[in-house]
């Protein structure tokens, strides 16, 4: 079955950096787009970024543009999120999610269990 | 403030039916497919409905989706206590070039 396992979360100071990883298995990783979605404590879902199946195109939310970068290594079946210049408002559980299609269809059909990022001094 | 508008909470008795609305605009719901997600307490979201009204394998037919114009609706019949969760609608917004979610609706089964 599909498994998405996030790692790399933790506590980081404001202005710091962190790289999240998402190890995928149980499906053909190279043929699906992938997303990062976050959820601040007690809040709703916020889409963060998307990358096409082959890495040829990415999109990200205005709130993280210029600070976060999504990437993927199809040879390792792994999705990444490089987060720089972190702010307190970036504190959230970060979920890796698979898109229904190769492109951004707006439908996230499989989700990981999430990894917590806390930005605090 | 979310791009898609959902009621913060709904409630109904076991066995009853409930509907959850999701209101948007021509750039999101009006021109793209809508998905619905269920988030049980302490767990990751799970896809319930995709492409407005389709159910993934394993989702019971108690859950249904519909769309009309710039609004979408999730319906749940035969409510069970295990249905208590937060429900989110989501879609692509062509103007924002971003995926968007509703603020979420907490379902309480009394």
Image (cartoon, coloured by chain):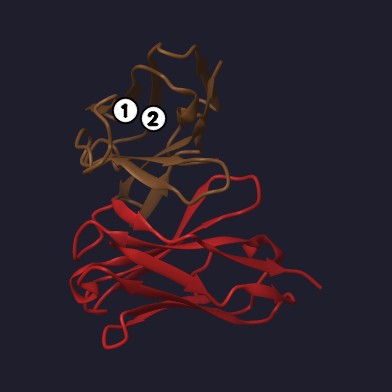
Chain colours: A red, B brown
Q: Which mark is residue B71?
A: 1
Q: Position of residue B88 (x, y in %)?
A: 43, 38
The residue beneath circle 2 is B22
Q: Position of residue A93 (x, y in %)?
A: 58, 60
Residue B45, relative to residue B108: is it above or below?
Answer: below
Dots 2, 1 in contact, CB < 8 A: yes
The residue under the point 48% across, 51% down is B44
Residue A73, relative to residue A112: is it above or below?
Answer: below
Mark 1 surroundings: few (<14), some (14-19) or many (≥20) residues within 10 A:
some
Q: CA distance from mark 2 to mark 1?
A: 6 Å
Residue B77 in the figure: left or right of residue A38 = left
Q: Residue furthest right?
A: A121
Q: Chain of mark 1?
A: B
Residue A118 appearing in the image: yes
Q: Chain of mark 2?
A: B
Assign a secondary structure to mark 2.
Answer: strand
Residue B15 in the figure: left or right of residue A64 = left
Q: Closest to the observer: B85 or A35?
A: B85
Instruction: Give residue A97's quadrant in the image.
Output: bottom left
Q: Which mark is residue A71?
A: none
Q: Earlier in the sequence, mark 2 or mark 1?
A: 2
Q: Position of residue A2 (x, y in %)?
A: 30, 63
Residue B22 in the figure: left or right of residue A52 = right
Assign a secondary structure to mark 1.
Answer: strand
The residue under the point 46% across, 14% down is B14
The residue under the point 60% across, 45% down is A43
Residue B6 appearing in the image: no
């Amino acid at each position: 079955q599909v498994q998405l396992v996030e790692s790399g979360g933790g506590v980081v100071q404001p202005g710091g950096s962190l790289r999240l990883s998402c190890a995928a298995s149980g499906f053909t990783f190279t043929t699906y787009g992938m997303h990062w979605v976050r959820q601040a404590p007690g809040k709703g879902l916020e889409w963060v970024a998307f990358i096409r199946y082959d890495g040829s195109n990415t999109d990200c939310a205005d709130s993280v543009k210029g600070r976060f970068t999504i990437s993927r290594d199809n040879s390792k079946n792994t999705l990444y999120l490089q987060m720089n210049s972190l702010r307190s408002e970036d504190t959230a559980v970060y979920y890796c999610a698979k898109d229904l299609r190769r492109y951004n269809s707006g439908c996230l059909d499989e989700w990981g269990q999430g990894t917590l990022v806390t930005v605090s001094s | 403030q979310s791009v898609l508008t959902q009621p913060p909470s709904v409630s109904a008795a076991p066995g009853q039916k409930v509907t959850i609305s999701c209101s948007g605009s021509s750039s999101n719901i009006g021109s793209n497919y809508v998905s619905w997600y269920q988030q049980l307490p302490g767990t990751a979201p799970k896809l319930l409905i995709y492409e407005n009204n389709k159910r993934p394998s394993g989702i019971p037919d108690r859950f249904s989706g519909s769309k009309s114009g710039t609004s979408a609706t999730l319906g749940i019949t035969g409510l069970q206590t295990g249905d208590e969760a937060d429900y989110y609608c989501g879609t692509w917004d062509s103007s924002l070039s971003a995926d968007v979610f509703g603020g979420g609706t907490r379902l309480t089964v009394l």
